[in-house]
Amino acid sequence: YLQNLREIVPMLQSKHGHNHMLINLSQESHILTQMSHKVLNTGWLDLHAPGLDQIFSVCMAMEDWLQA
């Protein structure tokens, strides 16, 4: 998936400038953070469903970012 990210990050930057955010719904990725500074790492474990409080937290982060 890293190859896809190497294509997606420049595309987002070219089309949206600094008006985008990536939400990583898996374990923290330092590679992803190096590719883009606008990354929300959720830290969710692979192959495990997150708790409702974690899902709510991500939804609130999305809403806050969209409102800003």
Image (spheres, rainbow, N blue to C red):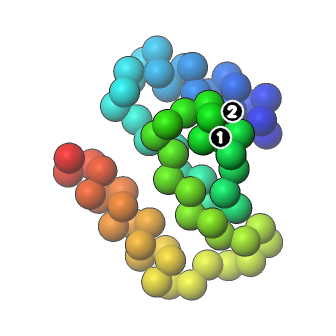
Q: Would you call the spot at circle 2 few (<14 residues within 10 Å), some (14-19), or many (20 or more)?
A: some
Q: Would you call the spot at circle 1 few (<14 residues within 10 Å), some (14-19), or many (20 or more)?
A: some
Q: Residue flagged by tag 2: what amino acid is it? A: Leu
Position of residue 59 relative to residue 22, above or below, is below
- What's the mark number on residue 52? none
- Identify the residue at image location x=49%, y=74%: 55
Q: Are marks 2 and 1 in contact (CB under 8 Å)?
A: yes
Q: Quadrant of the N terminus?
A: top right
Closer to the eye: label 2 or 1: 1
Residue 2 spot, x, y in % from top left: 77, 35
- SS at circle 1: helix
Residue 37 spot, x, y in % from top left: 49, 37
- Identify the residue at image location x=65%, y=69%: 44
Nearer-the-camera pick, 36 or 19? 36
Using residue 56 as the reference point, say whether residue 42 is left or right of it.
right
**Could you tell me how many numbered marks the image carries?**
2
Residue at the extreme top of the image, as rendered = 14
Position of residue 19 relative to residue 32, above or below, is above
Q: Residue at label 2?
A: 5
Residue 11 spot, x, y in % from top left: 55, 20
- Identify the residue at image location x=20%, y=47%: 68
Label 2 to label 1, Cα distance in Å?
8 Å
Position of residue 8 relative to residue 25, above or below, is above
Q: In which quadrant of the rendered view does residue 35 lie?
A: top right
Q: Residue at label 1?
A: 32
